[in-house]
Amino acid sequence: MTTVALAVMVFQRTGSVLHMGGILAASTLPVVVTSFVGGALLDRYPSRTLMVLSDLVRGAMVMALPFAAGASVALVYVVAAMMGIFTSIFNPSQIKLIGDLVPQSELMRANSYLSIARDGAELGGYLVGGVLVATIGYFATFAIDAVSYVLSAVLLMGVPV
């Protein structure tokens, strides 16, 4: 949902399709460039802890986006990039957590389900984000998405160690 709200917010604030694309690239590039960081952190910290931390930080950053946009578009680029960095910590942690929880004989099936769930959530997020931004605006959409990150962190705390 944040992706849609972020693109709309930046376009409304700047009127620039270039900035809109730049913001989306700024949030995605760190995921590609810094994914090795998530793997290195997994060698030192429990995956569940990294996932909870990542979700809490991303939730706070999602709520910071409209305020950052009020200050400057450059600040939105920074917040979007930081969200991408914490996503690069969350994603490998998620894969490792599945490996820790699921027996080896079920690992391929579990990873397939994870992939379907992640891709389905992304698809659903774009659709729901579009509806929400069109009906209640980007600020409320950011708030709802921030709550979803916090809810995810709370649910992750219940996952066995």
Image (cartoon, grey):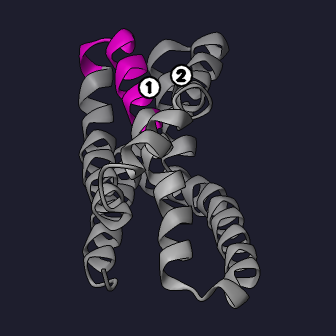
Query: Is label 2 in contact with label 1 (beta carbons under 8 Å)?
Result: yes
**Which residue in the structure is indicated by mark 2?**
26
Q: Residue shown at 59%/60% (left/top)?
A: 125
- The reply to whether the magenta stretch includes residue 77 is yes
- Residue 45: horizontal and vertical position, in percent? 29, 54
Numbered marks: total:
2
> Which residue is at a point 31% across and 79% down the rendered structure image?
155
Any mark on residue 18, and which? none
Density class for disc 1 (Cα within 10 Å; few <14, some 14-19, many ≥20) is many
Q: Where is 147 relative to 158, above or below? A: above
| 2 on left or right of 121 | left
Q: Does residue 78 sit above or below 133 in this rendering?
A: above
Give the residue pinned by disc 1.
81
Based on the displayed image, in which of its 4 quarters is residue 86 positioned? top left
Of the residues shown, which amino acid type is indicated by label 1?
Answer: Ala
* Kind of residue at badge 2: Ala
* Inter-mark Cα distance, 2 to 1: 5 Å
Q: Which residues are magenta?
A: 70-84
Determine the secondary structure under disc 2: helix
* Mark 2 or mark 1, earlier in chain: 2
